[in-house]
């Protein structure tokens, strides 16, 4: 059963610490997204990659967030330094985009981050 | 900028009481409209994609429809297991693969 795998599922850290979240997309998918979900803002797009190349990271605070895809099986989202306002659930999603029509996105279970 | 507005924010139904959820959108060119279901503590789960006005798709008790300005998710004779948050998202012609999500409708179906 193919699924998107995210680690860690839960993370509690103190303000100023570095946080790294990892995502293993579904094998064969060529598009990977990072979303953040909070009660106030709903689901916000942070960044996404196609064929491992970053296409859009306009939703990400550039001074503290970074997203990478070192290979086709791993996407990372790093926050350094973390702040309390970063507390949220971070979702990774992957999909297969072919030509004009978008494919469905498959979401992971999320990484719940709490910054104290 | 893409705008996606869902209503109502929350909906309580009795088992068997049919209803509809609304998703209004403002985009310069719609590539696709998506419906997702999200259970507490889980990631969103894909339900439907609609591409053009007039299109309809069905899955069990759910039916999604699309017009040029909005989409409806009709729930026929809901059961308690249909309780979840339903999210609508749009993909615009010039936005690449980006999806813009609405805030969701939290549906509760009481037995």
Image (cartoon, coloured by chain):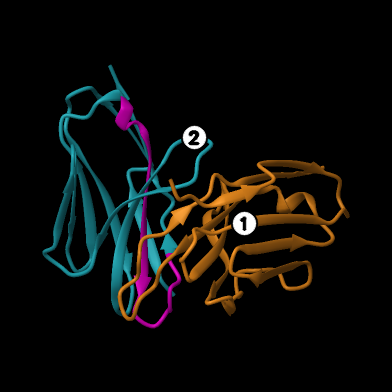
Residue designated by label 1: A23
Q: Chain of mark 1?
A: A
Q: Position of residue B64 (x, y in %)?
A: 20, 52
Q: How many marks?
A: 2
Membership of B30 in magenta stretch: no
What residue is shown at x 58% (from left), y 69% (from top)?
A: A72
Q: Position of residue B111 (x, y in %)?
A: 28, 16
Of A93 and B7, the residue lying toward us: A93
Image: magenta residue range? B81-99
What residue is shown at x 60% (from left), y 78% (from top)?
A: A54
Q: What is the quadrant of the N terminus of chain A in the image?
A: top left
Dot 1 lies on which element? Answer: strand
Q: Chain of mark 2?
A: B
Crowding at label 2, few (<14), some or many (≥20) Cα neighbours within 10 Å? few
Dot 2 lies on which element? Answer: loop
Q: Position of residue A70 (x, y in %)?
A: 68, 71
Q: Which color has been applied to chain A in this rendered view?
A: orange
In the image, farthest residue toward the left? B54
Membership of B91 in magenta stretch: yes
Q: Position of residue A47 (x, y in %)?
A: 59, 69
Q: Which color has been applied to chain B in this rendered view?
A: cyan
Q: CA distance from mark 1 to mark 2?
A: 20 Å
What residue is shown at x 25% (from left), y 26% (from top)?
A: B79
Q: Is residue A98 left or right of residue A8?
A: left
What residue is shown at x 58% (from left), y 80% (from top)?
A: A53
Query: Measured along the vertical axis of the image, is residue B13 above or below residue A79?
Result: above
Tags 1 and 2 touching, CB below 8 Å: no
Of B102 and A22, the residue lying toward us: A22
Q: Which mark is residue A36?
A: none
Residue designated by label 2: B40
Of A111 and A42, the residue lying toward us: A111
């Amino acid at each position: 059963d193919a699924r998107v795998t995210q680690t860690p599922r839960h993370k509690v850290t103190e303000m100023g610490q570095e946080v790294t979240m990892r995502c293993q997309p579904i094998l064969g998918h060529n598009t990977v997204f990072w979303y953040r979900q909070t009660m106030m803002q709903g689901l916000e797009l942070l960044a996404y990659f196609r064929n491992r190349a970053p296409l859009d990271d306009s939703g990400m605070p550039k001074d503290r967030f970074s997203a990478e895809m070192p290979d086709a099986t791993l996407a990372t989202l790093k926050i350094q330094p973390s702040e309390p306002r970063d507390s949220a659930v971070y979702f990774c999603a992957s999909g297969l985009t072919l030509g004009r029509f978008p494919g469905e996105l498959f979401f992971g279970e999320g990484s719940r981050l709490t910054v104290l | 900028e893409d705008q996606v507005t869902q209503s109502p924010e929350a909906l309580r139904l009795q088992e068997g009481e049919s209803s509809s959820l609304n998703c209004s959108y403002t985009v310069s060119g719609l590539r696709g409209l998506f419906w997702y279901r999200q259970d507490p503590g889980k990631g969103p789960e894909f339900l439907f994609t609609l591409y053009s006005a007039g299109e309809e798709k069905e899955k069990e008790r759910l039916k999604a429809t699309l017009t040029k300005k909005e989409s409806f998710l009709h729930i026929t004779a809901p059961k308690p297991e249909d309780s979840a948050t339903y999210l609508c998202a749009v993909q615009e012609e010039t936005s690449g693969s980006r999806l813009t999500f609405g805030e969701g409708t939290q549906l509760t179906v009481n037995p």
